[in-house]
Image (cartoon, rainbow, N blue to C red):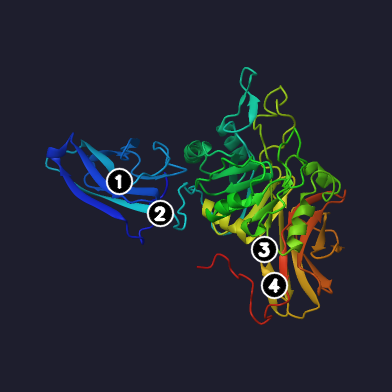
Amino acid sequence: MPPPAPAAIAPDVRIDGAIGADDRGSVRDLAFDVPADVTQIRVTFTLNGPKGAQVTLGIADPQRSRGWGGGVKKAFVIDEGFATPSFLAGPIPAGRWHLTMTVASIRAADRATYHADIHFTRRGDRPVGAFPNAPVAGGPGWYRGDLHSHTGHSDARCRSLSGRNIPCPLFLTTQAGTDAGLDFLAVTDHNVTSHFAELAVAQEYFDTLVLLPGREITTRFGHANLIGTTAVLDLSRAGEAGVSINPILKAAHATGGFLSINHPATPTGEDCLGCGWVASDTDYSLIDGVEVANGDTIDDFRGDPYRAKGAHLRVWERLLDRGYRLTGVGGSDNHDAVQGRQPQPSSIGRQSPVGIPATIVHACARAGDALVAGLKRGRVFVDIAGRRDRLLDLTLTARGRRAAMGEVLAIGAARDVRGTVHVRGVAGAHPVLRIGGSDRRIALPPVAGDDAIVPFRVADVRQALWVRADIVDAAGATILVGNPVYLDRGADPDADRSRGDECAG
């Protein structure tokens, strides 16, 4: 059930009343008017009275019933793209709506009061989250998850118990995320939102795992994940030749979700239509991230991840060199969560399990909105193997200033920068620094011990745009991919451009 609207925000409509013993079995029409251009209705109903007082609730728009929450769901959301389970999503028609309250039970001589707070979100307003944040404990820290997975709501296929090839049920993907020990999981079915309601139901059971609503915007120009929002997008012309991708990206960006390009270097062909990103007019200022490691191409990280079909890193770094600050992320792109549990091979082909590769993000809380904010901030690394015990963090300093991954370091006229790479769970591997604006690479000494801080100095950064770190094991495989610290020579070096404590306040 979604949380009620913040108490500090006055409701657009408040309906108050009282019931007594004579009202038992009665039905009250708590009507309210919805103005034009409303895209979301949030209802919070409160009943104050003795234990025996019980009511049930339903709601209808001017044309039809929009659901019944009974005596259980007294806080709910209805919007164009998502509704609390038991209610129907869809357009919000202007006119008279009806919140129907049935007095199911009240004892003789008892009395109870009630009030219904109703909040509207109007078109053009800042989006208000409709999907429930998971009830998972956790303050500021590193959280591990998978940002790319599919179910039978689009093209995921798996074997049924009798061995038939069927659309794969969503709960198998969420169970796989739990089995992998993930903190969060985005379900990103292609161009659909039908899985949102089922995902919200699953969230109540999988309450140790934050489930993020997502969709993979799938076009002939490429694929992009939009994560953390249930807002409606018009994708009806997404496959049409000659149609610019930018209106879709602009609408997606406006939702406030995390928007990332998927597997940009994957060749487009019959096996993967529109998979490579080929939209030459892309406005990258509308995009938050790039998928630098995809489950279908993680084998490339055992060789040279800048080559072959999985060279997403090269695409990403070219965009970084053009001045775009895009968070590098990873995802399994799993289409068969059952594979490996049954003797038959997957009908889709070899699949990377849910959680491999994993995206690890530093967030202010283990909750959907905090995770999306953390992804946008960019203090993020990708674990190619999806291990539970690994850490990669990067800090740079210059002229007394400090910045971490995803932040901007004002260096003024400084000719060099110093920093540290903090790693865990990678003993014997070595950090490799990558310097933006050039092909410079600096290999640091192998890591000794399970938890280590490796200091370094990068000389002559006059042409450098950013610095980031990867971790390469003794066999030469890239096992962790880090995000950049951005260098700004034009900024006042006496003005602290880092974000400081991102969770303060």
Q: Residue at x 59, y 51 (%)?
A: 247
Give me the disc on residue 95: 1
Instruction: Specify which label sits upstream in the sequence, 2 or 3.
Output: 2
Task: Residue 333: give its label.
Answer: none
Tell me residue 16's x, y (percent): 22, 51
Is 109 on the left-hand or right-hand side of 234? left
Q: Quadrant of the N terminus?
A: top left
Q: Residues within 10 Å of mark 2 (few under 14, many from 20)?
A: some
Residue type indicated by callout 4: Leu
**x and y percent of residue 443 in the render?**
86, 61
Q: Which kind of residue does numbered mark 1 sit on? A: Gly
Q: Secondary structure at mark 1?
A: strand
Q: Residues within 10 Å of mark 3 (few under 14, many from 20)?
A: many
Question: Are the residues at dot 1 and dot 3 in contact (C-beta closer than 8 Å)?
Answer: no
Sequence-wise first label, 2 or 1: 1
Q: Mark 3 to mark 4: distance in Å?
A: 10 Å
295 relative to 109 in the view: left or right: right
Residue 419 drawn at (x, y percent): 76, 70
Separation (CA) of disc 1 from disc 4: 53 Å
Q: Could one spot residue 451 in this view of the protein?
A: no
Nearer the observer, 306 or 217: 217
Q: Estimate the spatial distance between the alpha carbons at disc 2 and disc 4, rounded to whole Å.
A: 39 Å
Q: Secondary structure at mark 4?
A: strand
Name the mark nearer the viewer: 1 or 4.
1
Q: Which residue is identified by label 3?
A: 406
Task: Give residue 432's position: percent from left, percent from top.
Answer: 82, 60
| Residue at mark 4 | 409
Secondary element under disc 3, as helix, strand or loop, is loop
Q: Quadrant of residue 105?
A: top left
Element class at badge 2: strand
Q: Give yes or no for contact between labels 2 and 3 (Cβ–Cβ under 8 Å).
A: no
Name the residue beneath numbered marker 2: 122
